[in-house]
Amino acid sequence: MVHLLLTIIYISFISLGLPDALLGSAWPTMYRELSVPVSYAGIISMIISLGTILSSLQSDRLTKRMGAGMVTAVSVAMTAAALFGFSVSGSFLALCLWAVPYGLGAGSVDAALNNYVALHYSSRDMSWLHCMWGVGTIIGPYVMGYALINGMTWNRGYFIISMLQVALSIALFLSLPVWRKMEKEKGTGTAESSRGIRKALTMKEILRIPGAKEIMVTFFCYCAVEQTAMLWGSSYMVLHNGLTADEAASYASLFCIGITVGRFLNGFLMMKFTDDQMIRAGQAVIIAGIVILFLPFGKATAVGGLILIGLGCAPVYPCIIHSTPINFGADRSQALIGVQMASAYVGSCLMPPVFGLLANHISASLLPWYLLAIMVLMVIMYTGVIRKTSLSRQKTCQRN
């Protein structure tokens, strides 16, 4: 049963990644048909991000009331409905409206599944879970490309993905008895057992937890580095290293492949190393990749640096999530993971555009300095997390 449920969770995370890269892959066709400026993709993306932030912040309340299985099933159903809405939309306004349930559904399922795996499965499983998300981000654009190449519209690509989400949603609703049995056996039940002493934490209560503010900043910084490198890596190679746009696009994809492959390999490394060791190793590899970007050897250092940054990013996100119950307590992990997800989305949403302004008004060559500054802050904040949570656990042990 444990392995069956884990398989369902893996498939759920593939589905979470499926639509993430759809908008970017289809937008060159979409904006022309919709007769809107190319920059309007940012508006849709911003609406989705705001929805994910809001639902992440509510994940503790929702999961305690409904249970992780029901939250996942309902959230996937919401994203399926939103993607179907995209498939029948013929205007930019309609896309904006459907982006609301898409964002709300994506944020809820992300936080609920991350916490469930952190509580019930190993760090190895967590790393492979996020590898599955990477698989989804690869499959989604492939489906959209298949639709467009074969004479279908972008609407058809969204329709295909929405039907995959509908099938998964049905499977998740059918699997709810398995979720409930697992939660009962592990003592993490839902509505009835969640009332009273296990009430959802308020934001004020969360921020008072030792290390909570530091972990939020850590997540903000991590996603700022990941998304900035992902968005601006190609432009950096063109503007700073003199690569052609075609070369840069092909090499920049290696960054995402590095994250996906890295998370698969990390699953094996987690058999030997702890979450903390993998997080610190990942930070060191990211910084090494940034340092390589400073070296004046043209294409080789640009490509090598970005690949190394991608590999370094691989263990950080899943290992921080998996260590949350250990650092903050299983009873508070859903609340902490919810605010971590929200902080991650804020970093993803805010920091890449900030670098865009710097690149536009100063120079794209500032990318290594920008990434390095964020990484320094991240290392400082994560060190604070470990120090404060260790002290908190020691005080708890002394009282007991």
Image: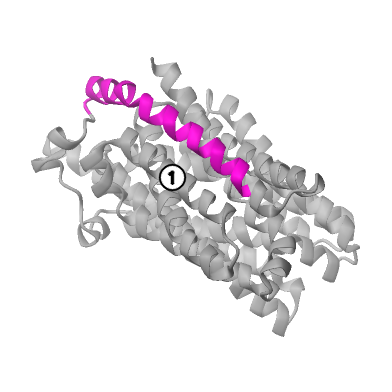
Observer-nearest residue: 123 or 16? 16
Please name the amino acid that badge 1 sits on.
Asp
In the picture of the structure, the residue carrying the numbered disc 1 is 110
Considering only vertical position in the picture, is 284 above or below 331? below
Name the residue: 63% across, 62% down.
228
Quadrant including the C terminus: top left
Q: Residue at x 80, y 48 (%)?
A: 151
Q: Position of residue 242 (x, y in %)?
A: 90, 67
Q: Position of residue 22 (x, y in %)?
A: 64, 51
Q: Which residues are magenta?
A: 158-187
For the stretch drawn in magenta, the main secondary structure is helix
- Residue 345 visible in the picture: yes
Horizontal placement of 25 versus 183: left or right?
right
How many numbered marks have been drawn onto this rendered protein structure?
1
Task: Give the answer, above or below, for where 349 lies relative to 289.
Answer: below
Scheme of image coloration: one colour
Quarter of the rendering containing residue 45: bottom right
Whether residue 108 is in magenta: the answer is no
